[in-house]
Image (tube, rainbow, N blue to C red):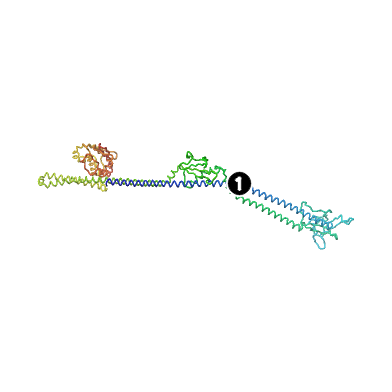
Amino acid sequence: MKKRILWIITTLMTAALLGVFVMQLYYIREAYNLKSQLFEQNVNEALNDVASKVQKRYAANHITKKDYELRKERERAVRDKAQEIVDYKERFRAEEAQRKLRQQERIIADLNMRDSLIRVSFPMPKLIPEDVFQQITYINNKSESSMQVQVDYGVDQEGNIIDVNQTITANKTGTFPSKTSAYPQKTTIFSKKTTTFSLAPGKLPDSIRYLAYNPKNLTPITITMEQVTDKLARGFKREDQLAEQRYKLGLEALMEDTVVLENNSLNYLEDVAKEMRQASVPIEQRIPKDNLDTLIKRELLNRNINLDYDFWLKLATKDSLLYSQAAHQTADGGLGKNVYKIPLFGNDIFRDPGLLFISFPNKNSLILGNMWATMASSAGLLLVLVFIFAYTIYAIIRQKKISEMKTDFINNMTHEFKTPVATIMIASEALKDPEIVEDRKRISRLAGIIYDENVRLGNHIERVLSIARLEKKELKLEQEELNVNDLILVVTDSMDLQLQKKNAIVDLQLNAVNPVISGDELHFSNVIYNLIDNANKYSAGIPKITISTRNTARHLYIEIADEGIGMTRDQTRRIFDQFYRVPTGNLHDVKGFGLGLNYVQDIINQMGGTIKVNSEKDKGTKFEISLPLNQN
């Protein structure tokens, strides 16, 4: 991939990522504005409900007060009316008593009049009790009276009867009481003086009984006179009916007056409305300060607003603070940020409506808290996009570098393969020369060259195949006991000609007391060989190589250090990448595929160890291998 195309792709992906980021910010801002508008709408609705309830409570207080006054007035009216009814009944009873007294007087007068007529019509009539009347009128035998009446009287010079004395004697054969009864055999019933009726205490009998004398023959007779005549009784009955009718009409009139009072009391709402419209009522008396905070909190909670707030009350026409429970009010008392207001009595025209202010210092925290899911999802999406973008750019750059390294690898591999092939071709052409055929030494030498180059070519091919098997996890290492100190001596001895070619100085410090590990001898020898070969190749002057071993309780450490050209920090991080080769600067004779250190790391990892590198530019490089000891 060309560099220009890479930059174009990177620019387009960056622009797309920025576009998504801007859209997410726009979406979050719009969501915040929507939540803010919804919050303001809920607060305004809550304030409207608070103002409505304040007005209703003010009206309810007036109605309650007026209802109490009306109830008291009604109770007084009922008491007065009840007393009036009681007085009316008392007056009726008094009038009834007076009427009965007058009727009794009329009865007495009528009795006296009829008594006078009897006294004029009959000689010496006498009043007798009812029981005496019964004895007189009792007839035990038809031929014989139950009583004997003896009348002694005298006549004056003018012929008038005087000194009348009557004696009633019971018949001995009759069934009247004996001498021991309540009536003696000879009893004087009446005196000679005439008695008249009066209103004296006592009840008159229904029938008045007289014992009189027949004016013709002066025989005793009984006379019965009813107490009340039919005419008087009818008159008295009519008077009682009229009085009772007047009583009922008057009582009904009193009861109707009570109903009218109750009907008129229903107009008290008009009186309440008049009182509520009075302009002289100050606003402090119209607002329940003690319950205002409770009303506000209840209405806010009904709309899921559980947030600290401050509120204060002011006059609308004057800059006068009436009530305050605010810690965050602005210095001038005006509208600051996140402050809302509403008139409590907006329908009042002539009176100050009063303004209720409410402030939410932590409004943004509530809105952002409600948006946490939206913000978290947006942030997560952006992080995913950024990761994908970064990983894509990294993969593109990595693939580009791998492509470059593979190109270098192919070039190096072609060069490395071309050299032995060319050598073999030259040696083969030389063998065709008739002069050389006759010289056995030269044939043996050319055969040796062909064999060595074949071995060299085979080693290159085997190295590439080993790397391929390592990548596919197909390379299986043999597990056998290895003495690392001895193995290092063998490898350095095999590389003696190669080291002497550059006059390399090798310092062996094999101090490991227990150098035995488990591993594959061939591949571990290749590891040591690669590291010593790199130390030899990447030295500008005479190579100085130090190889040391040491033990810890469970590990064996191998260090291979040189004083060569060294590496930068960035090169050190990439040194184990496949196909990567450190730039050699002025060293043009360094050959290789860029597979050595990658192979070294894979072998060490499969043996359960680790490898570290510490390098400084122009000062040298040190590789440290840590391998677990053979615990058997």
Q: Is residue 324 left or right of residue 90?
A: left
Q: Quadrant of residue 595?
A: top left
Q: Quadrant of residue 571?
A: top left
Q: Which residue appears farthest toward the right when viewing the image?
A: 157
**Vertical placement of residue 182 versus 445, above or below:** below
Q: How many marks?
A: 1
**Vertical placement of residue 161 versus 402, above or below:** below
The residue type indicated by label 1 comes to Glu
Q: Quadrant of residue 505?
A: top left
In the rendered image, is residue 546 in sight? no
Q: Is residue 376 left or right of residue 630?
A: right
The quadrant of the image that shows the C terminus is: top left
Residue 298: image x %, image y %? 50, 46
The residue closer to the viewer here, 330 or 325, is: 330
The residue closer to the viewer here, 321 or 629, is: 321
Q: Which residue appears farthest toward the bottom when viewing the image?
A: 142
Residue 531: image x %, image y %? 24, 41
Residue 119: image x %, image y %? 83, 56
In the rendered image, is residue 274 in sight? yes
Q: Judging from the image, what secondary structure is the residue with disc 1 in? A: helix
Q: Is residue 307 left or right of residue 498?
A: right
**Disc 1: CA contacts within 10 A as few (<14), some (14-19) or many (>=20):** few
**Vertical placement of residue 68 versus 510, above or below:** below
Residue matched to label 1: 69
Q: For the point 60% across and 50% down, which residue is it? A: 267
Residue 120: image x %, image y %? 83, 57
